[in-house]
Image: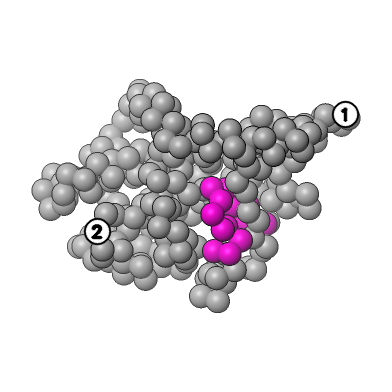
């Protein structure tokens, strides 16, 4: 199957398939997956507005480059695939891809720490260095039920704005990036900030918040640090880790 798909697509598409499959498996490896639910989508180059998403029903730790499904903006298959897709689950992703030219990859999770913080009125608190990076580029979207309705898309896009991070209230976390590497590394920081916050609040002791002045100063620093450096530095090491613990994503 992998050789058949690889022979049918460009080298650029195949590399994106490999990176996206790795991203899925890393999400599983770090424990952020939710059985077969949620998506990580990637826009393919070209004017057709085609995307790669996961085959519905596969767990994230078994996804491969060849099993990813190519779809259009409405999540209709545009290339033969034996695997089903979940059009309803693509609602959030299609809205963001359509509105943000720079959002080549959209990563959405239902992680326990992320959902826990999304349910807290104050959202992300300035309690850690990780949180300052998130707060430098964070939007919030109120819960409107399971995201299936077309009329929610404009509100979702407006709440994301030009940010990298979006907290979906009572629902989970979302990041966007130029590629799967950047989207993953942003999610790593987002998830870490939420995990630290949950643990800090559970400690039952007085907390030391980071000053607003420092948080504001982080906005400029974050723009310098995050432009291509996250994926460029950490991604090769993450792939080596994946090769040791769950190889085969490139098939």
Pointer 2 or 1: first along the chain: 2
Q: Say whether residue 169 is visible.
A: yes
The magenta segment? 157-169
Quarter holding residue 198: top right
**Quarter of the image where the C terminus is located:** top left
Q: Is residue 2 left or right of residue 109?
A: left
* Crowding near the residue tagged with mark 2, few <14, some 14–19, many ≥20 C-alpha atoms within 10 Å: few
User: In the image, is 160 to the left or to the right of 54?
Assistant: right
Residue in the image at 26% along x and 63% along y: 47
- Verify whether residue 132 appears in magenta: no
Residue at 62 percent across and 48 percent down: it is 138
On the question of residue 242 being in view, the answer is no
Q: Is residue 182 left or right of residue 188?
A: left
Question: Which residue is label 1 attached to?
Answer: 205
Q: Which mark is residue 46?
A: 2
Q: Residue at x 45, y 37 (%)?
A: 227
* Residue ID at (30%, 37%): 249
């Amino acid at each position: 199957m992998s050789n058949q798909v690889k022979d049918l697509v460009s080298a650029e598409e195949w590399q994106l398939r490999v990176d996206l499959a790795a991203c899925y498996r890393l999400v599983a490896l770090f424990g952020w997956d939710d059985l077969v639910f949620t998506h990580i989508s990637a826009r393919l180059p070209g004017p057709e507005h085609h995307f790669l998403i996961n085959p519905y029903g596969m767990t994230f730790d078994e996804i491969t480059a060849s099993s990813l499904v190519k779809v259009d903006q409405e999540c209709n298959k545009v290339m033969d695939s034996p695997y089903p897709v979940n059009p309803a689950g693509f609602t959030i992703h299609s809205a963001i891809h359509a509105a943000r030219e720079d959002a080549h990859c959209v990563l959405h999770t239902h992680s326990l720490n992320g959902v826990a913080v999304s349910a807290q009125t104050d959202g992300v608190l300035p309690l850690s260095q990780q949180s300052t990076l998130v707060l430098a580029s964070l939007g919030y979207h109120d819960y409107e039920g399971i995201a299936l309705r077309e009329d929610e898309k404009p509100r979702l896009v407006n709440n994301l704005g030009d940010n990298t991070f979006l907290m979906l209230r009572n629902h989970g976390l979302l990041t966007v990036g130029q590629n799967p590497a950047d989207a993953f590394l942003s999610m790593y920081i987002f998830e870490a900030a939420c995990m630290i916050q949950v643990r800090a609040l559970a400690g039952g002791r007085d907390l030391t918040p980071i000053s607003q002045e420092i948080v504001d100063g982080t906005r400029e620093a974050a723009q310098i640090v995050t432009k291509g450096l996250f994926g460029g530095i950490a991604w090769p090491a993450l792939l080596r880790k994946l090769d040791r613990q769950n190889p085969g994503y490139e098939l």
